[in-house]
Structures are given as C-alpha cells and as structure tokens.
Amino acid sequence: MQAGQDSFSMKDDKFSLYDSLALSVTLLTRIPMPMRKAGAADWSFTPAFFPLTGALTSAVSSIPLLLFANFAEAPTGRAECVAAFCAIAYVAIGVWFTRGLHLDGLCDSVDAFSAMGCDKARRLEIMKDPHPGSTAVAALVLLLILKIFAVYWMLSGMQAGVSLATGNTVAMALALACMLSRLGMSFLSYLGRYPRENGTAAMIVGRTSLPATIVAAATVALSAILLLDRFFTCGPYLWVAIIAVFAANTIYWLLASKAAIGGVTGDILGACCETLECSLLLLFGIYISAIPVAPSTF
C-alpha cells in the first residue's frame, strides 16, 4: 500500500459504497475497477471490504486446485504430485494477483524491525528502501515455504485423499484464512495511527470508521460460521484456536509497530496479512491432519 496518492486522489467527501469496494479491490489486487475520485468518506469505509477482497483473491488462487483435484482420484503417487502442484500454484497465483503487495510489506517490516541501534525515523526510512536485506529475504523464503507446505498438508491430510470434493473443502478453508488475514488489516487500520505525514495508507490507517470495522468483522464471522459448520465437524477448540491466532498476530503487529516506528503503515498492514494467513493455513493443516476430515460437496 505504498502506491502514490495521485492514483487515488480526493475530490469530495460524498460517500459511495461502490467506490469503497472499488478502492479495496484496486488497492489489493490486479483488478482495476472504475471509480470516481474518492473522498475521505470512501477511504474510511474501504477496510470494510478487505475480507471480501481476500475471498476474491483466494477464489482466483484456488482455480488450479479445483481444476486439477479432479484428476487426483487415482494412484497415491499421482495424487501426491497433484497436491504439491496445487499448493505451489495456489501460493504463486496469490502472489501474482496481489502484485506481491503484502509480501513487500512483510520484507520492509522485517528489515525495519531487525535494524539495530536505529530510532523510529531511521526505521521508517528503511521501510522506504526498495532493496530487501538478507533478513527480509530469509523471512520471505520461509513464509512462502510454510504456506506451500500448509496447503499441501491440508490436501494430503484429508480422510478420503485428494479429490474434487477434497478440493472444495480445502478451498473453503483457504478462503476463510484469506478473509481473516484481511480482517486483521481492517482492525489495524481502525486501531492504528499513521506515523508519516503522507502516503496512501494515511487515508486509511487511523481514519477507518467503526461501522466499516464492524461490517468487516460481521462478514468474516458469518462466513466462518457457514463455512466451518458446512465443511468441518467443528468443535470449540478450533474456534478458540482461530481466535487466538488472529488476536496474537494482530496485537503483535499493533504493539510492535507502535514501539518500533510509532504507528501502523501500509507495510505493517501487509506484514500482518501475510503472517496471519500463514498461521491460519498451518492451523487448518494441523487440524485436518489431527482430526481426519471427510470431504464435503457443495
């Protein structure tokens, strides 16, 4: 979310739900949606649609999974290959579809947080540097490996093996992880304060309205109830684990960014999104492996 502000300049303060949705999709994906010049009211409601944009990202990324899972109902060797391919494709398409925006935020945040003997101003300068450091590269590689492994773990851990029905079930888990990770961005946008004088995220962080945050949370809560109850035999432990993972990631980035750089930037939003999504994918992988889940169909 470090794009120039000229791309989304303000004209007036007339509110439009469509323009808020268009801003969310245009900012967080490759899809350019037509809109008028957005006003402050549009920006303040934009995080309400972050979870829906996450669902869209997951849907696009899951296309290979749903297509190729149909060919996996056969020998175990071929099923394992299909699971590995689908896991890699899911992560790769997600990076492409989001323009690597959140990964860039993770790298910049790791660089800034790992710098020794720096004050807040210097760390903010480091976050502006387009060249990633060795720590950021290591964090990026580790995160991508963990995400691929988690998706593969989910596919291979299903009770009936890899199949089209399995693909449907895993796709729902992936969608929920994407939505929850974007909800973390919505919460940080509402709770955080922007430490710079200007920037694209300055139009969102600290200016997100309470109604927008409530809408985002309600969207994810309803989706979680429908998806988990529909596709999993979900006991209270999974709900508690999901809430704990969400809270731990969001609170960490809120407090750590305040201490390190004085507030929440667009890079911090992206970093929170990536670590939260990865944590949730691993959680679902553990759950499916520990408690065999029978695949469901739509």
Image (cartoon, helix red, strand yellow):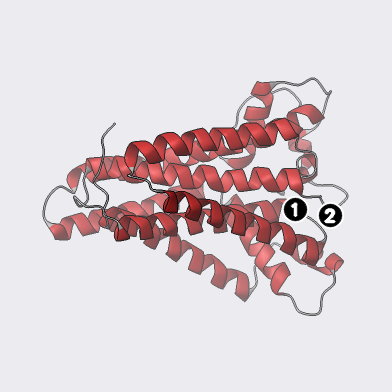
Pick whichever, 231 or 101, lies toward us: 231
Q: Is residue 210 above or below residue 157?
A: above
Amino acid type at image mark 2: Pro
Mark 2 residue crowding within 10 angstroms, few (<14) / some (14–19) / many (20+):
many
In this figure, which residue is indicated by the disc labeled 1? 265
Residue situated in front as seen by the camera: 291 or 54: 291
User: Can residue 88 be spotted in the picture?
Assistant: yes
* 10 Å crowding of disc 1: few (<14), some (14-19), many (20+): many
Between 155 and 122, the one lying in front of the other is 155
Residue drawn at 50 percent across, 45 percent down: 178
Whole-number angstrom distance, CA of label 2 to CA of label 1: 7 Å
Query: Where residue 112 sits in the image (x, y, percent)?
Result: 73, 68
261 shown above or below 238: below
Check if mark 2's residue and mark 1's residue have beta carbons within 8 Å: yes
Label 2 or label 1, whichever comes before in sequence order? 2
Q: Is residue 131 visible?
A: no
Q: Residue at x 80, y 56 (%)?
A: 263
Furthest residue in direction bottom, as rendered: 117
For badge 1, the amino acid type reads Thr
Residue 42, picture quadrant: top right
x then y, percent, for residue 61: 42, 44
Query: As displayed, is residue 88 above or below residue 183?
Result: below
SS at badge 2:
loop
Give how far across and how far down residue 222 sits, in percent: 50, 33
Q: Quadrant of the C terminus?
A: top left
Residue pictured at 61% horizontal, 50% vertical: 101
Which secondary structure, mark 1? loop
Q: Which of the 4 quarters of the picture holds residue 10?
A: top right
**Would you name the residue on which mark 2 appears?**
195
